[in-house]
Image: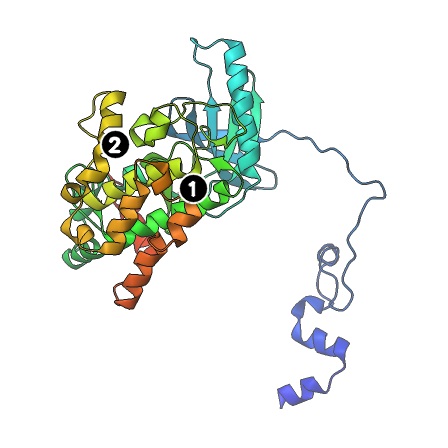
Amino acid sequence: MQLDSTLNLGSTQLLKALDPLTDARVPDFLRTYHDRPGRPLRAYIPEKPVEDLCWNARYKIRELLGHGAQGVVYLAKREGVDGYYTNVALKLFYRNPEVTPEEYGYEMRRVGLQAKRVSGVQHDNLISIRDFVALGETRVMVLEWIDGFDLARLLELDRHDALGRRLPKKLWERLNDVVVTQGEDHCRLKPGIAVDIVRGCLAGLSSLHHNGIVHCDLKPSNIMIKRTGTKKIIDIDSSCVVDEDPPHLRGTPYYMAPEQLLGKPVRFGSDIASLGYMLIEMLTGRLLFRDCRSVDDLLKAKLELPSRLDAILPDEVNGDSLLRGLVSKMVAVDPKFRFADADAAELDRMGAVSFHRQLVKSDLSTEYDRELAWWVDFLDESGGP
């Protein structure tokens, strides 16, 4: 009866009957922003458009997140007004006393240019750059804060052991059966999970490669796994644009492609080799080049790697032609025989997607993002060692 009688009302009466905000008792100050339905307020637009806006942002350092060759990264609270604040990551590029102000300025202009390039890409699997500013002499990059762990921390054996001491037996067994288990140097991931992480990285790399950018420094500590299971590539300071930027040797030699170690121009395939070395380490639980003591040792090991894969990879990998082919083509010594770029590594016949499709057909696939998120949540709750 009530519904029928309501439908007989006029439109204004109907809205008043359904929306308590239209009641006459609503205070006048609320009506400034919430006028009666059917009579919305028009936005106020000044006659002269604003051309320049400038204000100071206040950041409060909360904790140290990490540091590298060039910068120190902090978690900071960016404070606004009216109670607003948000978490961000601040990377401070302190000048080493051994570097002249002129050298520092040149390098910071390069980093600033790369920040501008990457900030225009905007991809879910790539860190978002919010600003690049000066604090006195020191340059500061304002970045999104990523709630999760980098891959290097995620794979730490001590962290895994600590988790095993607090999880119920059934959960612990499921985690080791589906996601991650003990390795020799670090944790070993199940093939489906390892390839899922690679595919997340390839998605972010694809957005860079389509814009002519090579990351040049892919390594476990530069891959973040969010609490949601999403993968994020971070740290673009070493990146360059193919055939446009001057040649440079920046990055981490341990994960560099052979051509990078030889000082040759980098190509998109250089990123694929770095990602391939990480994939092997995730599948084996071993540091691939742990016995190398020099750049010459590293180069020799990488040149010999394709011939040693059968002895390095677990039987479950060697026995799967698609996964074995993916690994082999990612770490090929000659760039001509490697996947040319991220799209090729994802979509080619021997690409990462083919392996996952095979798992789907065999009813062996899982919700990888959810499994990763499940793992990250457990680690966060355990507090780690």
Which sits in the foreground, 9 or 288? 288
**How are the residues colored?**
rainbow
> Is residue 11 something one can see in this rendering?
yes
Q: Position of residue 327 (x, y in %)?
A: 27, 46
- The residue pinned by badge 2 equals 303
78 lies left or right of 268: right
Query: Element under label 2?
Result: helix
Looking at the image, is mark 2 or mark 1 earlier in the sequence? Answer: 1
CA distance for labels 2 and 1: 36 Å
Which sits in the foreground, 56 or 278? 278
Residue at (46%, 31%) from the top-left corner?
239
Pointer 2 with pointer 1, Cβ within 8 A: no
Q: From this viewpoint, which residue is outermost toward the right?
A: 47
Label drawn at residue 84: none
Q: In the image, is residue 136 above or below residue 40? A: above
Three-letter code, disc 2: Leu
Judge the density around disc 1: few (<14), some (14-19), many (≥20) Cα neighbours within 10 Å: many
Q: Position of residue 136 (x, y in %)?
A: 56, 16
Which sits in the foreground, 224 or 381? 224
Q: Quadrant of residue 146?
A: top left
Q: Position of residue 17 (x, y in %)?
A: 68, 77
Judge the density around disc 2: few (<14), some (14-19), many (≥20) Cα neighbours within 10 Å: some
Q: Quadrant of residue 184?
A: top left
Three-letter code, disc 1: Ile
248 lies left or right of 49: left
> Is residue 288 something one can see in this rendering?
no
Which sits in the foreground, 171 or 39? 171
- The residue pinned by badge 1 equals 146
Disc 2 or disc 1, which is closer to the eye?
2
Q: Quadrant of residue 113?
A: top right
Residue at (71%, 78%) from the top-left corner?
14
Please identify the quadrant where the N terminus is shown: bottom right
